[in-house]
Amino acid sequence: MESRFKLIFLVAVLFMTGLPVLGILRGTDPPPTLPEEKPQALPPSSLLEPSRNSESQGPGIREEMVEVPAGEFILGSDQGGFNEKPAHAAYLGTYWIDRYEVTYQQYMEFVEATGHRQPGPPSRYARKLEALRGLHQPVTYVSWSDANEYCRWNGKRLPTEKEWEKAMRGTDGRTWPWGEGLAGHPANFAGEADGFLVTAPVGSFQLDQSVFGVYDGAGNVMEWTDDWYVEDLYSQEKTISKASDHPPSTYKTMRGSGYTSQGVDLRITNRSFMVPDFRDETIGFRCARSN
C-alpha cells in the first residue's frame, strides 16, 4: 500500500513539474494587438460640413456683386487717427464689389476645387473654431495670400482701400454705413450683446448696409484689401496719385471692424494693418472687380 502511494505521488510530482516544460516547448500566445489606426482622408463633401451650432442648412448665399458708380466721395476723417487724416475728396471710376463677405461655404468650394489649404489657425489651437464654421458665416483664419488666391480663382480681385471705403460709406462722408450714432445693435461688434457669440451669417444686420447695398462694413470681420499699408498715405496723395506707387511695406491694409471690435475701431474710416501671412478669427475678406 505504501509503495503504491509513493508511486502515485511520484507520478503527480512529475506531471506538475512537466507543465512549464510543455509550455516552453509549445510556446506562448502573444498578447492581442489592436488593429492599426490609419488616418482617414475626409471625402471632399465633408469639407462643407456646417457647424452644429449654426443655422446654415438652407441654400448658399449667392455671390452677388454691387455696382459702385464713378464719381467723387469723401475719403478719410479729420476726427480719426493720424493715418485717417486729412479728410478729402477722392475720385474712383465705376467698379463692382461683393455684396457680402465671402462665406465659409464659398471658400470651401474653392478649397475642394483647387486643393488650396483649408482655413484655420497656424497651430492646432483655435478658440471657438467650430462656432466660426457655419456655411453662411464669413470665412475666417485666411491670410492675405489665401484671400487673394480665392478672388483670382473666382475671376475677381481684392478691393483697394478706396474702393472698400466708398462702397461702405457712400459719398457724403458719413461715419457708419447707416449714418451717425451707435444706438442699439446696428452691427455685429463689441461682444455678445447683439445676440451672436462670434460672427453672424452674412447680411444678418439690416442697418449694417451701405447706400449701395453692401453689407457688414461695420461688423462681423475685418477685411483684407489689396493695398500695402502706408501710414501717411492721405497726406502724400497730393504728390503720389495711387497707393500702388508706394514701395511695398511690411503690412497689408485691413478695413472694417470685427465682432470683437469696440470704440474708434468701429469707424468706416479706420485703417488697420497686419503682416500678409497672419490668420485670425476676426479677419475675412470680400472681392471686387473692375468695370
Image: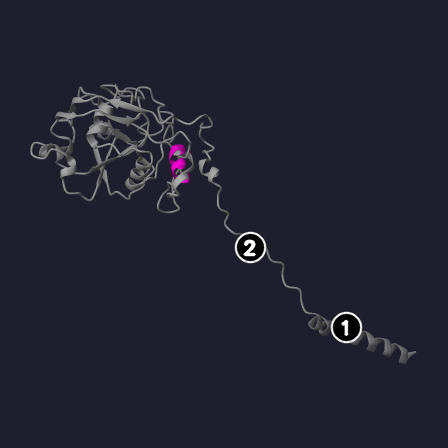
Predominant SS along the magenta part: helix
Q: Quadrant of the C terminus?
A: top left
Q: Is residue 12 left or right of residue 280?
A: right
Instruction: Report helix, strand or loop for mark 2.
Output: loop
Q: Residues within 10 Å of mark 1 (few under 14, many from 20)?
A: few
Residue nearer the viewer, 180 or 192: 180
Distance between the alpha carbons at the discs numbered 2 and 1: 40 Å
Instruction: Farthest residue to the right: give it.
Output: 1
Q: Which is closer to the viewer, label 2 or label 1?
A: 2
Residue 43 appears in the picture as rendered: yes
Looking at numbered disc 2 in the image, what kind of residue is underneath it? Glu
Q: Which disc is residue 16 wearing? A: 1
Q: Position of residue 81 (x, y in %)?
A: 16, 32
Q: Which disc is residue 186 wearing? A: none
Q: Give the answer, above or below, for where 31 lies relative to 231.
A: below
* The magenta segment: 105-112
Instruction: Farthest residue to the bottom: give it.
Output: 3
Whether residue 111 is in magenta: the answer is yes
Quarter-of-image position of residue 194? top left
Q: Give the answer, above or below, for where 170 lies relative to 130.
A: above
Q: Position of residue 11 (x, y in %)?
A: 83, 76
Query: Mark 2 sits on what residue?
Result: 36
Whether residue 106 is in magenta: the answer is yes
